[in-house]
Amino acid sequence: MKVVHIITRMIVGGAQENTLLNCIDLIDQYGDEVTLITGPSEGPEGQLLQRFYHPQLKIMEAPALTRNIKPWQDWKAYRQIRRILADINPDVVHTHSAKAGILGRLAAWHLKVPAVIHTVHGAPFHPYQSALARRFFACCERYAAKRCHRLLCVADAMTDLMVEGGVADRDRFTTVYSGMEIEDYLQADQHRTEVREQFGFNTNDIVVGKIARLFNLKGHKYLVAAAQQVIQQNPHVHFLLVGDGSLRPEIEAQIEAGGVTDHFHFTGLVPPTDVPRYLGGMDILAHTSLREGLARALPQALLAGKPVISFNIDGAREVCITDVTGILTNAKDVDALAEAILRLAGDAGLRQQLGEAGRAKCREMYSHQLMTDRIRAIYQEVLNSAS
């Protein structure tokens, strides 16, 4: 097949890694001719294309394709995408992210591409937006949904949100979990001694990690608030924050005000290849984001054999199952979060049991090769129905 993927930016992120691995697998597993169209990918998050270079993957940049809404520039981006697609004449166009998803679908539909597919990595409308912004993005998604043949979601929860938002009927959606390279996570404990020595953890310290940018809606403040309760009852618990961002000064001030500075440790910005290393040093992963499709940190931690504690948001419940792979709590419930941390911190046998169950579950769900097999079969279904 001739396949074109379109995404707004190729920064370091879950949706971007998913897309790039899918592109490479289509080449390696099926011999497809694959082109990736993306906008400029500069930013503090870092770029991903160098990490997953493949000589047969064609990269085409649409210079006007940027994340923020700018009507005149968006019109230019649409025309750039349409021109590239007209030159390639693909069998399949597969779009990702909100901006590229809308412009790419419109361009492909106008050119009568036989199979137009869109993946929802995270709903572009959510409760933390203004009502006007929420209605606007939902309306855009409804319009674009009518201009593609199939909608894929990285979690069942994404389908629920899109259906509830009136984007499309449920039978238009298929869940395909976001694949990743899993081997490094399965071997994460190889780094345990090195990481724990780096931060000065003792053998009897329990390390609770969080992997997320230090930005709004990632929920670090709830973890810091819970930590104050936890440390009073179990002073052996420490917290390792993997990532960096604009909220770091605010989070550090909250930590200092709470008198728990000695129990918090920051890695700063790290490349994705280092995430398994830091997971190896952890005993528990806490995920306190308020909005996320299905955060890759959850399956990554489970693949590393670490139990997870998560707020019950979006797709988290599909991998964080209370007393099976971890503990799910209500969003923003600091007391429940503290209680969950104390429970796991105090029971090594339970941590091992939940981590092993999570590893077995996620090995089946998150292989990127299996993800590509499912997506390729969907391409073929759509093309067969069009012929």
Image (cartoon, rainbow, N blue to C red):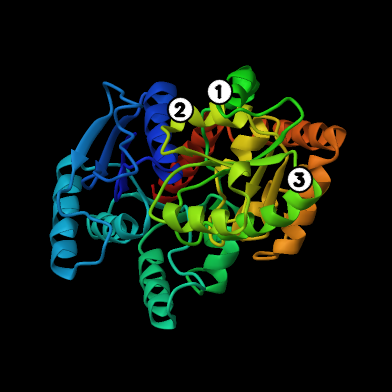
List x then y, in percent, for residue 144.
36, 65
Q: Is residue 208 above or below residue 289?
A: above
The answer to whether residue 40 is visible is yes
Residue 29 vs residue 192: left or right? left
Residue appearing at x 76%, y 52% in the figure: 232
Name the quarter where the N terminus is drawn.
Answer: top left
Q: Secondary structure at mark 3?
A: strand
In this view, 147 is above or below 7:
below
Nearest to N terminus: mark 1 or mark 2:
1
Label 2 is placed on what type of residue? Thr
If you read the primary sequence from the N terminus, does the residue marked by circle 3 or circle 2 appear first? 2
- Of residue 191 and residue 186, the one placed in the foreground of this image is 191
Residue 209 in sight: no
The label on residue 273 is 2
User: Is label 3 in contact with label 2 (beta carbons under 8 Å)?
Assistant: no
Mark 1–mark 2 CB contact (< 8 Å): yes
Residue on which the image places disc 1: 184
* Residue 376 higher or lower than 111, as above or below: above
